[in-house]
Image (tube, rainbow, N blue to C red):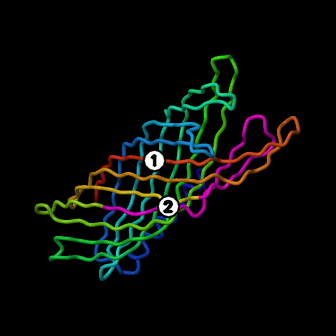
Amino acid sequence: MKKKLLSLLTLVFLLTLAPLKLGLCSNWYPYVKLEPSTFTWKEFDDQGNLLLKEQGSALFLGIGIWNEIVPRWILHSQLEIFLAPNVKYQGHTMSGIPVTTTNKWLGVSLETLGGVNFPIFDNKLNLSILGGVGDFTWLRSISTTTLSNGTVVYGYTEHWENVYLKVESKLSFLIISKLKFSFEGGMLYPIFVSNEAKLPGMLDTSQVYPKGTLSPFFQVALSSSNFKLGLSYVKFSFKKSSPDTVTSVSGDLYLIWQPDSTFSILKAFIEVYF
């Protein structure tokens, strides 16, 4: 995770400062971001029945920069850390015994978008079209718990990697002097998804590759030259993976797969510009 974070930081630095070094920016706006959030993770069987649900509060901490590149091109890069130390897990064993515990999530994401801005009515109305790529990786630590019948269910940690394409449009208009309202919406499409875990009782590390599907996101916000605050929603959807074969400590072979899953995040956010 440390190497991943350092690599993402380096990439953000290079992408955001390159236009400045080349003298192409007419304006640039670095910012810090705070996002109290709630999220829900769900997994489903082949018939669409709910297998498990995780829900809890999270905190995203981010830094980013908007570059306005002559004449009307824009570049936006953002790096975020995702913290969720107390997530409620509700599921059941294969024999139907309920399982309730508390899990921990930790992640990091990088997103870089480029596009064009169309000012209308002397900049009182703006339409922007952007597209780009993002990388959201997280650790999902499932805690050890004891069932009602005394059976111990041992925990483990999953390492998820989600690389996605993003296309969005943004419409903003001036309400009063220097205060704007904006609406953003678009679609995300995961192009590479993996889930790696060392399951209890297994000799091998399993790695499966769920398939991404088109997923929506939107954002509404009020902004001035110094701050931006609003609400955003994003939903990632993953289809069932092909199975991976792993060997248990007793020498038996098991098939491991990731079922259909969804990851929904609702954020309230504030950005402060410098």
Measuring from the top left, give residue 105's x and y in whole percent: 53, 41
Which SS does the magenta portion mostly show? strand
The reply to whether the magenta stretch includes residue 200 is yes
Q: Amino acid at mark 2?
A: Leu
Tell me if label 2 and label 1 are in contact, CB under 8 Å.
no
In the image, which residues are magenta?
184-211
Camera-side residue of 272 and 49 = 49
Name above or below for residue 196 compared with residue 125: above
User: Which corner quadrant holds the C terminus?
Assistant: bottom left
Q: What secondary structure is found at the residue carrying circle 1?
A: strand
Q: Amino acid at mark 1?
A: Ser
The reply to whether the magenta stretch includes residue 75 is no
Extreme-top residue of the structure: 149
Q: What secondary structure is found at the residue carrying circle 2?
A: loop
Measuring from the top left, give residue 104's x and y in whole percent: 54, 36
Image disc number at residue 30 = none
Circle 1 sits on which residue?
264
Measuring from the top left, give residue 58's x and y in whole percent: 43, 40
Few, some or many residues within 10 Å of mark 1 (<14, 14–19, 20+)? some
Circle 2 sits on which residue?
214
What residue is at 55 percent from the left and 57 percent from the top? Answer: 6
